[in-house]
Image (cartoon, grey):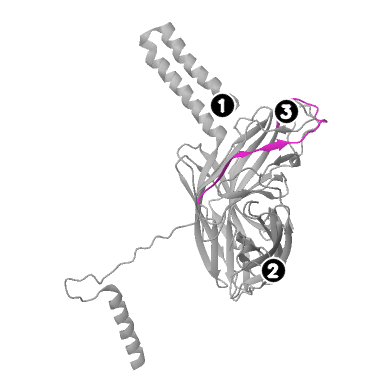
Amino acid sequence: MRKLVFLICLAFGVVQMAWAAQVTLPDTSQTTTFTANVSEQAVVSVPVSITFNVTDVASSTQATADATVSATTIVLSDGKALKVEIKANADSFTAPTGGSVTWAASDISWDAATWENGTGSSGQLSSAGFTQVAASSANASSLSTSDLTFTLAAKSSVDRAGSHTLTATWKFSSFTP
Amino acid sequence: MLQSIPVEKLLFVGILAMVRTNASKGRSNIAQGLATSIVVCLLALGCVARLFAVSLHFSPLTFSIQARPGEVVNKTFTLTLPQEAQTTQFRAHIEDWWRSEDNRQTFYAPPGTLRRSCGLWCTINPVESSVKPGETLTIRLSVRVPDNVEPGGYWAALTVDEVPDPLAPKPNGVAMVFRTSVSVGLFVEVSPCKRSARLVGARLDGDKIAVRMCNDGNVPLRVTGMVEFYKPGDDKPTAVAKIGAEPLLPEPTNVCEYSVALPAPDILPSGKYKVRIIIDVGLDFLMGAEKELDITKPDSS
């Protein structure tokens, strides 16, 4: 019982010390610590669409404009990097009315491009998984490119003009425990 | 509709509307013509924003949780659209994920696919929501660790996808339409965890050096490291390449190869090098390996 009373008194004393102290004036010995808890975060930006002006189905066609992809205000734990990946939402493009042949998702490829604060990887679009397009350097606060070139492979069996469309998803992640 | 009309045409129509109104209806209608042209130009600008970028801010990118069996842990995820964005629908769901052995692809599957998935422990709310420009979507995540769970590491991902607008115009011609998706890694550790890994190989892979690691434990590990290149007889490295923080999972494959670009030819010219690899997976010690490699690269000129 005495031990219990002693421990309670001790704990009470510690609490008192944490909240107040008697000092001799003038005094500058008292401090308060301010803590800002910063969450991991990023702002990401991708194009809505890109177009291929296919004038010769027997030759490969580059997109009409290079894609601009960026991530800014990247705040991550020490040493981590932001990954940019892409995946096709379907195995192939949707052909226009009357068309029986169109391009497969894997007919789309991209170059490594020049990335600021990161490394790009050339690749081929897949509907099975997200393929890496770029990764930021460790601790980079931004990652961007404006010269990511997508190329559509030749397919001479395409038999209808019109809208051939494929939806793809950009993924941003940083999976590190 | 707007998205399929070229921006230049809209701007032209806007200017034309102003000129024609001013000319034919006199000065009293200048204000009306100006208003028309402003509206058309604003629509055009909206179209530009929609054509060129979908932008969003999100936080956090990882949830790392230490939990006991039976414990409930609550977290929140936020996603904010900028003022200049369009109202967008988002759908959230929990998924299992893993990496390919070459670390170049990420695969996703329904929760519970992996043996060490914590996806089925999670509930999220809301699942689908419309976010207006400048608004913030807050998703509450609740992780209920089962009472009878075995110790070790478990993982999943909270994925938030942009939902396609069914009324959005379809682009003309041959085109790819893009959606945005963010995935937040969710790692739950139930003590005691077995942390164990091995460095099992290193090789040249084109203009990269690839380091192969194996996870022998039962918890995802964070791999960081560096590759040092020494000229024969030198004590100081000619060049150093860093391996950024990457996950090393214990399943479905416990092997992963991490590639890092070789330094530029002016820093690391072609030649024979002693390559020293140092890896940190958060254990009490670092792992290392040394290997002689003949690096042949095209001249920088």
Query: Are tags 2 and 3 found on a single chain?
Result: no
Could you tell me if the residues under marks 2 and 3 are in contact, i.e. CB atoms within 8 Å?
Answer: no
Neighbor class of circle 3 (other Cα within 10 Å; few <14, some 14-19, many 20+) is some
The residue tagged 3 is: A54
Q: Residue at x 38, y 7 (%)?
A: B26
Q: Which amino acid type is shown beneath numbered disc 2?
A: Glu
Q: Quadrant of residue A151?
A: top right
Left or right for A76, reference B226: left
Q: Is residue B163 above or below residue B247?
A: above
| Secondary structure under the numbered disc 2 in the rendered image | strand
Q: Which residues are magenta?
A: A141-164
Q: Residue furthest left?
A: A25
* C-alpha span from label 3 to label 1: 23 Å
Residue A128: x %, y % from top left: 73, 49
| Secondary structure under the numbered disc 1 in the rendered image | helix
Q: Residue at x 54, y 64 (%)?
A: B64
Residue B234: x %, y % from top left: 64, 66
Q: Nearer the viewer, residue B191 or B284?
A: B284
The residue tagged 1 is: B2
* C-alpha span from label 2 to label 3: 51 Å
Query: Are tags 1 and 2 found on a single chain?
Result: yes
| Secondary structure under the numbered disc 3 in the rendered image | loop
Instruction: State which mark lies toward you, 1 or 2.
Output: 2
Q: Is residue B136 above or below residue A63?
A: below
Left or right for A102, reference B16: right
Residue B98: x %, y % from top left: 68, 58
Instruction: State which mark lies toward you, 2 or 3.
Output: 2
Q: Nearer the viewer, residue B294 or B125?
A: B294
Q: Which amino acid type is shown beneath numbered disc 3?
A: Val
Q: Say if residue A84 shows up in the picture.
A: no
Q: Nearer the viewer, residue B119 or B251?
A: B251
The residue tagged 2 is: B290
